[in-house]
Image: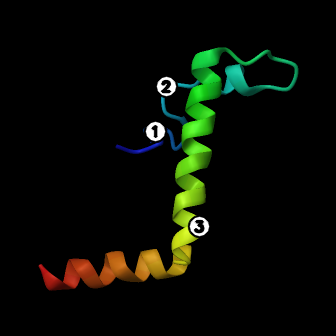
Amino acid sequence: MRLTEKKDSGHWCLRDVPWSDLKPGVVLSEKTWEKLYGALWKLKDYEDTGVSPDEIERMKTEGKRCW
């Protein structure tokens, strides 16, 4: 499952967390905090792989050629 969602307009956000819940001065709800923590945890795991975003794009392109 994706961590983010993108609207047809091109706007995106953290899945199920409106930007208004992340504005400066807003007290985070427990649900929002858990979503942020989970997203940052997955980002940490991704960064720990050592794979760069460019390498991911290359793997996606090469994968399409195989099918």
Give how far apart the Cα atoms at labels 1 and 3 are.
21 Å
Mark 3: secondary structure:
helix
In contact (CB < 8 Å): disc 2 and disc 1:
yes
The answer to which image quadrant residue 64 occupies is: bottom left
Residue drawn at point x = 66 percent, y = 27 percent:
19
Mark 2: secondary structure:
loop
Give how far apart the Cα atoms at labels 3 and 2 are.
24 Å
As displayed, is residue 29 above or below residue 24? above
Residue matched to label 3: 47
Residue 12 in view in this figure: no
Residue matched to label 1: 5
Residue matched to label 2: 16
The answer to which image quadrant residue 12 occupies is: top right
Residue neighbourhood size for the residue with mark 1, other residues' Cα within 10 Å, grouped as few (<14), some (14–19), many (≥20): some
Q: Quadrant of the N terminus?
A: top left
Residue 37 drawn at (x, y percent)? 62, 37
> Hey, what amino acid is under mark 1?
Glu
Going from N to C along the chain, the mark reached first, 1 or 3, is 1
Residue drawn at point x = 69 percent, y = 20 percent:
21
Going from N to C along the chain, the mark reached first, 2 or 1, is 1
Q: Nearer the viewer, mark 3 or mark 2?
A: 3
> Hey, what amino acid is under mark 3?
Glu
Residue 54 drawn at (x, y percent)? 53, 80
Q: Nearer the viewer, mark 2 or mark 1?
A: 2
Q: Is residue 40 left or right of residue 2?
A: right
Q: Quadrant of the C terminus?
A: bottom left
> Hey, what amino acid is under mark 2?
Asp
Mark 1: secondary structure:
strand
Q: Is residue 19 left or right of residue 23?
A: left
